[in-house]
Image: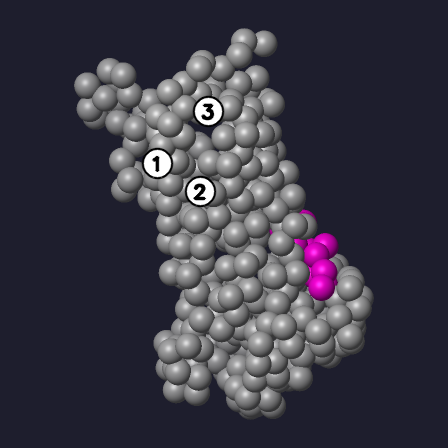
């Protein structure tokens, strides 16, 4: 196997670039989209219908706490103020740093192994199926490494007012006390099942959209092919590719995300105004949860929060990829110039 050119950073530098760029990109994306994430979580953990139309259609007389994005936004702002939209953002950032760092690092290593080279140009020649598999495996590794922070984020973001847990530390101690260490991984099974198609679709379709965009550039800009590669797409084009990739992945995988959230908040004693609670051991397993939600809440129950989730997934995916590409290129240029 031919060794990479001298100007290509070594494997240690490459891993550092991927980890740092991935972590920064994830933190920027998570902070920007936190308000939509909080609204999405509130919808997903609400057992009652999340739209006024669903209430009428199912002939339900009981009130629902949240019945739409606008109404939910007004309610959260009125009851919790602006900080309410960033509930759980600390564990979310603590989660996204190792998650994104592990994800991009493992992804690069897998692509390097598959392509036989650490060069970006070689990675672009991988088939969509290899990009899909690499993305899925990277997502699984990142999920296992950061899952406890994900669970804490969900609990803090869904509790509302008055707070059950004033801090992340208090939530962690109570979960360990009442559920044990396994409680920190409640909902991991549907998460891993979800992450395989989600991460695979996100990274696989991202590479595909970049190829299509590069081909479009070649057709419409005659001089584009002179010394240019897929890495020379504009920031706006990378934004659109990330937006399309994130949206496609979220639409396919949303029901499993709902199931995950239900497992994560089992037994959480929220105020009665937030509706019925998800009791401890309400679901035996992932398939039982899917069956019960479908039976009691209908198909709409599996897609609660799909609107804020889709609205969030688009800019989140776009911001993540653009921030990663820019940060990665910047770090690579610094490390390459310093070693020359």
Q: Are marks 2 and 3 in contact (CB under 8 Å)?
A: no
Q: Residue at x 50, y 30 (%)?
A: 13
Instruction: Please tell me whether mark 2 sits on a helix, a strand or a loop.
Output: helix
Q: Main secondary structure of the magenta part?
A: helix
Crowd rating for badge 2 (residues with CA inside 10 Å; few <14, some 14–19, many 20+) = many
Residue 136 percent location from the top left of the image: 60, 40
Q: Is residue 53 visible?
A: no
Picture quarter with the N terminus: top right
User: Residue at the spot x=37%, y=45% of the render?
Assistant: 323
**Residue 338 drawn at (x, y percent):** 37, 27
Is residue 296 positioned above or below 97 on the image?
Answer: below
Q: Earlier in the sequence, mark 1 or mark 2?
A: 2
The part of the chain drawn in magenta is 184-194
Indicate left or right for 221 with 276 as reference. Answer: left
The residue indicated by pointer 1 is 330
Q: Which residue is mark 3?
A: 9
Which picture quadrant has residue 210?
Answer: top left
Q: Residues within 10 Å of mark 3 (few under 14, many from 20)?
A: some
- Residue 186 magenta-drawn? yes
Q: Which residue is mark 2?
A: 21
Q: Is residue 227 in sight in this rendering?
A: yes
């Amino acid at each position: 196997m031919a060794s990479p050119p001298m100007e290509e950073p070594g494997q240690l530098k490459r891993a550092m670039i991927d980890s740092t760029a991935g972590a920064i990109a994830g933190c920027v994306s998570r902070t920007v989209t936190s308000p939509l994430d909080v609204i999405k979580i509130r919808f997903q953990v609400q057992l009652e219908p999340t739209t006024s139309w669903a209430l009428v259609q199912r002939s339900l007389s009981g009130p629902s706490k949240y019945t739409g994005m606008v109404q939910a936004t007004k309610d959260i702002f009125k009851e919790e103020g602006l900080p309410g939209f960033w509930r759980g953002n600390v564990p979310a950032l603590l989660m996204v740093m190792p998650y994104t760092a592990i994800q991009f690092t493992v992804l690069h290593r897998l692509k390097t192994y598959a392509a036989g080279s650490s060069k970006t140009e070689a990675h672009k020649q991988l088939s969509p199926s290899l990009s899909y598999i690499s993305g899925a495996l990277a997502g699984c590794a990142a999920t296992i490494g950061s899952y406890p922070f994900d669970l804490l984020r969900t609990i803090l973001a869904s509790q509302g007012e008055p707070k059950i847990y004033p801090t992340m530390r208090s939530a962690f101690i109570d979960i360990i006390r009442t559920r044990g260490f396994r409680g920190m991984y409640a909902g991991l099974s549907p998460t891993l099942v979800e992450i395989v198609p989600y991460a695979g679709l996100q990274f696989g379709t991202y590479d595909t959209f970049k190829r299509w965009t590069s081909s479009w550039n070649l057709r419409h800009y005659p001089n584009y092919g002179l010394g240019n590669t897929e890495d020379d797409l504009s920031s706006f084009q990378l934004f659109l590719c990330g937006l399309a990739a994130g949206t496609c992945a979220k639409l396919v995988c949303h029901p499993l995300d709902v199931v995950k959230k239900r497992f994560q908040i089992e037994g959480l004693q929220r105020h009665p105004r937030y509706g019925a609670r998800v009791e401890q051991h309400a679901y035996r397993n992932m398939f039982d949860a899917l069956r019960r939600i479908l039976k009691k809440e209908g198909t709409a129950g599996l897609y609660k929060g799909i609107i804020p989730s889709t609205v969030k997934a688009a800019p989140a995916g776009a911001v993540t990829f653009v921030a990663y590409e820019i940060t990665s290129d910047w770090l690579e240029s610094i490390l390459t110039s310093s070693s020359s």
